[in-house]
Image (tube, helix red, strand yellow):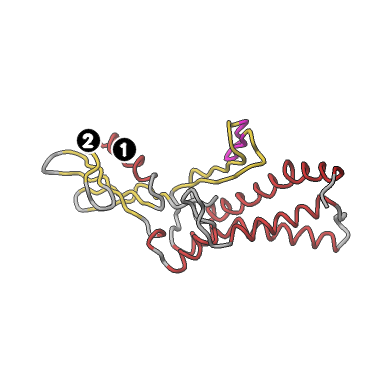
Amino acid sequence: MFGVHDIPKFFLAFFLVMPIISLLHETGHVFFAWLMGAKNIKVTVGSGNVVFRWGALEVRQYYFWYGQCTFDNLRRNHRLANALIFAGGSLFNAAAAVAVVYLIELDTLEEGMLTYQFTYFSLYYVFFALLPMPYPDGNFSDGKVILDLIRNRERTVEKIYYVHWNEEKTQWEVLNYSRELVEAFADEAQALAKAHEVTQRTRPSRLLRTKDGQDIEVANYPRVPL
């Protein structure tokens, strides 16, 4: 039964152990994203106002709640690569939990409340990350995305946007994934800026530059895990 003496354990779990597990989870995602050649990698721990940034790490005011990572332009952008990225968080959590148990068995690490909470909540994280389910905000669990990737569901297929040079009208046109005109520009740089903006809104997506019958990938924006 929960008593007054358990309150310090509660604070220990939610203000120290859980943020560490969350950071490990996001690190697992970005590790595999990095292996797949991702650029612009960023890991965010917590929510609210930014407290500090250090390299790719961003820590926010409520560091004990929520975490996410973002990245762009995967060099290896195929279904298996994306599945590994989404599985990476759980793999890191599971590996960390197993490592702690193993070190305890070797008497290298002393068993205690910290190690118990760490292994317990690590497995908690793994279970709910891999449970294939949608979230109320429209996102999906890692397990749901992995399952959709295996089944090649439509929502995992990239939408392709274009920056197209219209020779007849002598203008750069931003086209959506249905090849419908979004906006036209005289300047290529302005067209590219607008194209990046609209492409990022609909992950997973790719941006192609088309001119003289050639399609060149400018950027890709994969779906990012939570």
Q: Nearer the viewer, residue 193 or 66?
A: 66
* Extreme residue toward the left, this view: 168
Density class for disc 1 (Cα within 10 Å; few <14, some 14-19, many ≥20) is some
Residue displayed at 85% across by 55% down: 109
Q: Nearer the viewer, residue 81 or 50?
A: 50
The percent coordinates of residue 222 (x first, y second) are 44, 52
Q: Horizontally, is 196 left or right of 69 in the view?
A: left
* Residue pointed to by mark 2: 185
The percent coordinates of residue 43 (x first, y second) are 57, 43
Residue displayed at 48% across by 64% down: 80
Q: In the structure shown, which secondary structural element does the residue marked by tag 2 occupy?
A: strand
The percent coordinates of residue 61 (x first, y second) are 63, 33
Residue displayed at 29% across by 34% down: 190
* Residue pointed to by mark 1: 194
- Position of residue 146 relative to residue 191, above or below, is below
Residue 100's disc number: none
Residue 224 is covered by the magenta coloring: no
Q: Horizontally, is 172 left or right of 91 in the view?
A: left
Q: Horizontally, is 63 left or right of 158 in the view?
A: right
The percent coordinates of residue 162 (x first, y second) are 27, 48
Q: Horizontally, is 193 left or right of 129 in the view?
A: left
Q: Quadrant of residue 60?
A: top right
In the rendered structure, which segment of residues is drawn in magenta?
Answer: 51-60
Q: Give the total of numbered labels.
A: 2
Q: Given the image, on which type of amino acid does mark 2 rest?
A: Phe
- Position of residue 91 relative to residue 220, above or below, is below
Residue 53 is covered by the magenta coloring: yes
Label 1, label 2: how far apart the Cα atoms are: 9 Å
Residue contact between numbered discs 1 and 2, judged by CB atoms under 8 Å = yes
- Position of residue 58 relative to residue 178, above or below, is above
Magenta region, mostly helix, strand or loop?
A: strand
Q: In the structure shown, which secondary structural element does the residue marked by tag 1 occupy?
A: helix
